[in-house]
Amino acid sequence: MAYSENIAQRIRSSLEHLANVEEKKMFGSLAFMVNGKMCLTAGPKRMMCRIDPKLHEQEVRKIGCSTVVMRGRNYKGYIHVQEENLKQENDFEHWIELALDFNEQLTSKGK
């Protein structure tokens, strides 16, 4: 499994206050499921955040960010953030908060 243990540990620490968190290995990364929904992943030298698709265009413009692409398809609402752009705690927490906010929206809709 080729993922950044540093990112994985930082995500664990940020989610430790939540009751319903599960870790799953998928897509060559370590996914963090919150309330049964994919929320964040620790990948090789990057973190993937699942955010509100309405915020995608604004957030993906930030340095070190890119849209997740799988099998040639762009996934709006899924953003990779390079590890070097997560060094500052406030930058890291920004992405955690966006992912958790969207996760709450998904959970409250019952999806």
Image (cartoon, rainbow, N blue to C red):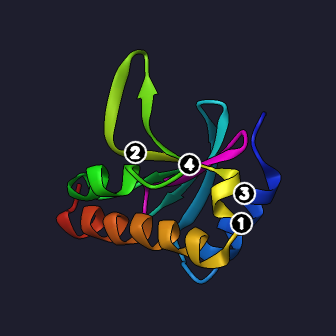
Instruction: Please tell me in which quadrant of the rendered image residue 107 appears.
Output: bottom left
Which comes sooner in the sequence, label 1 or label 3?
3
Which comes sooner in the sequence, label 2 or label 3?
3
Instruction: Please tell me in which quadrant of the rendered image residue 19 appears.
Output: bottom right
Which comes sooner in the sequence, label 4 or label 1?
4
In the picture of the structure, the residue carrying the numbered disc 1 is 87
Secondary structure beneath disc 2? strand
Q: How many neighbours does mark 1 have within 10 angstroms: few (below 14), some (14-19), or many (20 or more)?
A: few
Q: Which mark is residue 55?
A: none
| In this picture, residue 47 sits left or right of residue 104 | right
Where, quadrant-wise, is the C terminus in this rendering?
bottom left
Which comes sooner in the sequence, label 1 or label 2?
2
Q: Which mark is residue 8?
A: 3
Q: Residue furthest bottom?
A: 17
Do residues under tags 2 and 3 come within 8 Å of each other at their CB atoms? no
Q: Nearer the viewer, mark 3 or mark 4?
A: 4
In the picture of the structure, the residue carrying the numbered disc 4 is 64
Q: Between marks 4 and 1, how big is the CA–CA gap?
A: 12 Å
Q: How many neighbours does mark 4 have within 10 angstroms: few (below 14), some (14-19), or many (20 or more)?
A: some
The three-letter amino acid code for the residue at tag 3 is Ala
- Identify the main secondary structure in magenta: strand
The three-letter amino acid code for the residue at tag 4 is Gly
Q: Between marks 1 and 2, how big is the CA–CA gap?
A: 20 Å
Q: Between marks 3 and 4, how big is the CA–CA gap?
A: 18 Å
Instruction: Please tell me in which quadrant of the rendered image residue 36 appears.
Output: bottom left
Q: Nearer the viewer, mark 1 or mark 3?
A: 1
Do residues under tags 1 and 2 come within 8 Å of each other at their CB atoms? no
Residue drawn 44% across and 35% down? 68
The magenta region covers: 35-47
